[in-house]
């Protein structure tokens, strides 16, 4: 089986983990946590990074610190992994699901503009949804598959309508828009280090921000809001969302290899695109103008994608469908979905993700491509 996307632990991971074991610094305190946060902040061009247990917890804390309240509305693209939609519900808020661009599969900025103009009003310096009267307090642009939302157009809209921007950059570590890293545009950016991401700590996430005070607050909340270095005095509701030192050690080793991993992902994407260009219905994701993507997960559209999915998995190629759109999932089926043609539904029906680990060989990429060609022969 050629796997979809697996970790590449070919650097100093064993050395740094052994150091943790040898010194007994395996839990939530230790030098590797600080190193990992510093490396993440520097790489993403922000002033503060806070390591968390996973990307979902990073999103949760970011929503809390952005002032999202119960009964608020939060704008979210309909094509996303489920985590940000779940986190909105954690807050007692609801998502407004926004359709995506048919080419880039990112949140549709033209559609978003129309939504604001037709469906919203500014009242008492906050944005409200006209039909329900509910406050819209935040937007979560998800940089899907390592491509990016057009942030140059999104940010002025969000500023005008008085809503906070929390970037879900969990798939886009290493992607840039006009040279500026994903996760560095909004009030917060969130990263994930899950096992299938471009670098991994097994689990793990990161909160990025340029607001020093909010960065300190994020660190406080993720460490159970312990307010005294000696006494177990906690001054507000906190969360056990801290990343442990032994996983941060893996993260430090992975960060050392990240530039090479990004280069490999881009090479794999280019090779697939060249090999598959004549396959019936082949349609790769169009990269947003001015974006240099990390090419995290090679995903593209095909004719009879469900048949191809079964054929590949039956023949030793681990392939996965795209995420089910949020409006089709039971927890979110009653939430507002703003769309014209339901592009999200069309993308879901035709898209598949192909093996693209950073340690996949060119020979394996060509083998996968040949299997796809066999299916259509």
Image: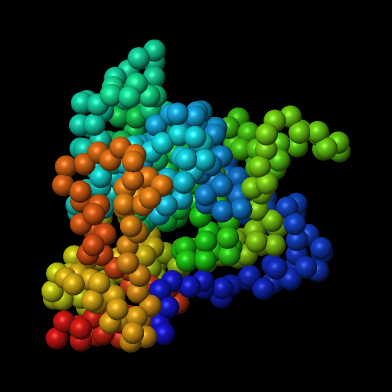
Q: Which of the 4 image quadrants contains residue 362? A: bottom left
In the rendering, at what x and y percent does residue 338 appear? 25, 38
Between 294 and 234, which is closer to the camera in this rendering?
Answer: 234
Q: Quadrant of the N terminus?
A: bottom left
> What residue is shown at x 46% (from left), y 63% (from top)?
198
Q: Is residue 18 above or below residue 229?
A: below
Between 234 and 146, which is closer to the camera in this rendering?
Answer: 234
Looking at this view, name the residue that lies furthest to the top: 124
Q: Which of the 4 image quadrants contains residue 11? A: bottom right
Can residue 176 be seen from the camera position used here? no
Between 174 and 315, which is closer to the camera in this rendering?
Answer: 315
Between 199 and 281, which is closer to the camera in this rendering?
Answer: 281
In the rendering, at what x and y percent does residue 20 appear? 75, 64
Q: In the shown orientation, is residue 110 left or right of residue 35? A: left
Q: In this view, does 67 lie above or below 7?
A: above
> What residue is shown at x 21% (from left), y 41% (from top)?
339
Q: In the shown orientation, is residue 51 left or right of residue 73? A: right
Q: In this view, does 272 lie above or below 315?
A: above
Q: Which colour scheme is used?
A: rainbow
> What residue is shown at x 82% (from left), y 64% (from top)?
23
Can residue 340 be seen from the camera position used here? yes
In the rendering, at what x and y percent does residue 103 appear? 20, 54
Q: In which quarter of the image is the C terminus?
A: bottom left
> What residue is shown at x 75% (from left), y 61% (from top)?
26
Q: Which of the 4 image quadrants contains residue 158? A: top left
Q: In the shown orientation, is residue 130 left or right of residue 140? A: left
In the rendering, at what x and y percent does residue 24 appear? 81, 63
Q: Is residue 297 above or below residue 289?
A: below
Looking at this view, name the residue that lies furthest to the right: 230
């Amino acid at each position: 089986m050629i796997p979809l996307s697996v970790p590449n632990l070919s650097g100093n991971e064993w050395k740094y983990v052994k150091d943790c074991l040898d010194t007994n610094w395996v839990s939530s305190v230790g030098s590797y946590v600080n190193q990992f946060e510093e490396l993440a902040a520097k790489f993403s061009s922000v002033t503060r990074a806070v390591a968390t247990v996973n990307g979902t917890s990073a999103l949760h804390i970011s929503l809390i610190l952005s002032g999202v309240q119960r009964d608020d509305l939060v704008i979210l693209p309909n094509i996303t992994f489920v985590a940000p939609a779940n986190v909105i519900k954690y807050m007692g808020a609801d998502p407004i699901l926004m359709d995506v661009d048919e080419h880039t599969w990112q949140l549709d900025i033209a559609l978003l503009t129309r939504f604001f103009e037709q469906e919203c009003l500014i009242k008492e310096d906050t944005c409200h949804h006209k039909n329900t009267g509910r406050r819209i307090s935040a937007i979560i642009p998800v940089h899907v598959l390592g491509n990016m939302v057009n942030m140059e157009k999104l940010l002025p809209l969000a500023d005008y309508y008085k809503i906070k921007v929390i970037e879900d950059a969990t798939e886009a570590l290493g992607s840039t828009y006009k040279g500026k890293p994903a996760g560095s545009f909004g009030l917060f950016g969130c990263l994930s280090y899950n096992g299938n991401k471009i670098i991994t700590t097994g689990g793990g996430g990161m909160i990025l921000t340029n607001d020093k005070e909010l960065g300190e607050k994020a660190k406080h909340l993720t460490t159970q809001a312990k307010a005294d270095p000696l006494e177990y005095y906690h001054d507000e509701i906190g969360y056990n969302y801290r990343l442990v030192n032994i996983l941060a050690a893996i993260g430090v080793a992975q960060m050392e290899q990240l530039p090479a991993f990004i280069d490999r992902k881009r090479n794999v994407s280019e090779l697939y695109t060249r090999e598959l260009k004549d396959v019936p219905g082949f349609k790769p994701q169009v990269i947003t103008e001015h974006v240099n993507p990390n090419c995290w997960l090679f995903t593209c559209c095909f004719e009879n994608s469900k048949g191809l999915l079964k054929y590949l998995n039956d023949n030793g190629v681990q392939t996965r469908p795209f995420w089910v759109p949020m409006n089709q999932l039971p927890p979110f089926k009653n939430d507002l979905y703003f769309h014209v043609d339901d592009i999200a539904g069309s993308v879901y029906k035709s898209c598949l993700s192909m093996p693209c680990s950073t340690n996949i060989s060119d020979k394996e990429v060509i083998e996968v491509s040949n299997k796809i060609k066999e299916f259509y022969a």
